[in-house]
Image (cartoon, rainbow, N blue to C red):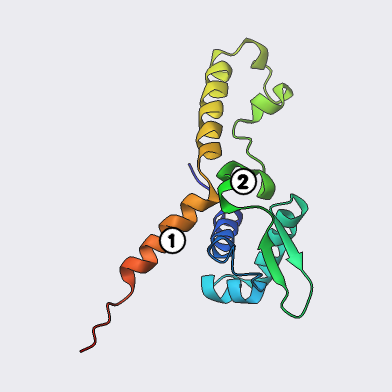
Amino acid sequence: MLFSTRIRYGLRALIELGMNYEKGPVLLKVISDRQDLSLKYLDHIFAQLKTKGIIKKMKAKKGGYLLNRAPEKITLYDIIEAIEGVSRIECLDDPRICKLARKCGAKVLWGKVNDRINDVFKSVTLADFVKEQKRIQEASEPIMFSI
């Protein structure tokens, strides 16, 4: 399964917000620099995430972006849906695409596969990604000794 650049970059940016969830807003420029992502590209992704209610923009001296709800309450499904939508098999959404759609056994099975994939996406949260990111960062930090 391939995920688009928009989804991968959006998730990376949301992990940054998740890691700062209780610390306050984060500037888009800071996220762009930390993740080595195009600021203009992130701006487009964040516009979609804001429209779908995943994030909110704080306008003030210490402005920036915040998650609109706790990382535990944002699923991978929510993120994918906000950025691109979660449809996988075209004929499941629009039977007019295939003239055999009404008599297709594969379509039934594709629907079951699609449902299972969506169940997995709904079971993984942004908090899971944040936890893994923190674990990796802690493991890679040098150990300081003092005498």
Q: How many residues crowd mark 1 within 10 Å: few (<14), some (14–19), many (20+)?
A: some
Above or below, 92 against 6 in this view is above
How many residues crowd mark 2 within 10 Å: few (<14), some (14–19), many (20+)? many
Determine which quarter of the picture holds residue 14. bottom right
Q: Residue at x 66, y 52 (%)?
A: 69
Q: Which residue is mark 2?
A: 80
Identify which residue is drawn at 65% across, 17% down.
101
Sooner in the amino-acid sequence: mark 1 or mark 2:
2
Q: Position of residue 59 (x, y in %)?
A: 79, 72
User: Residue lying farthest top?
Assistant: 103
Give the image location of residue 140, x and y in percent.
32, 70
Residue 30 location in percent, x, y?
60, 76
* Outermost residue toward the bottom in this view: 147
Above or below: residue 46 compared with residue 112: below
133 left or right of 145 in image: right
Q: Is residue 18 left or right of residue 51?
A: left
SS for tag 1?
Answer: helix
Amino acid identity at mark 2: Ile
Query: How far from the left and from the top, in percent, is residue 15?
Result: 54, 60
Q: CA distance from mark 1 to mark 2?
A: 19 Å
Q: In the image, is residue 122 above or below residue 30?
A: above
Q: Which is more toward the observer, 100 or 59?
A: 59
Q: Amino acid at mark 1?
A: Gln
Circle nearer the viewer, 1 or 2:
1
Q: Nearer the viewer, residue 32 or 14?
A: 14
**The C terminus sits in image quarter:** bottom left
Name the residue beneath numbered marker 1. 133
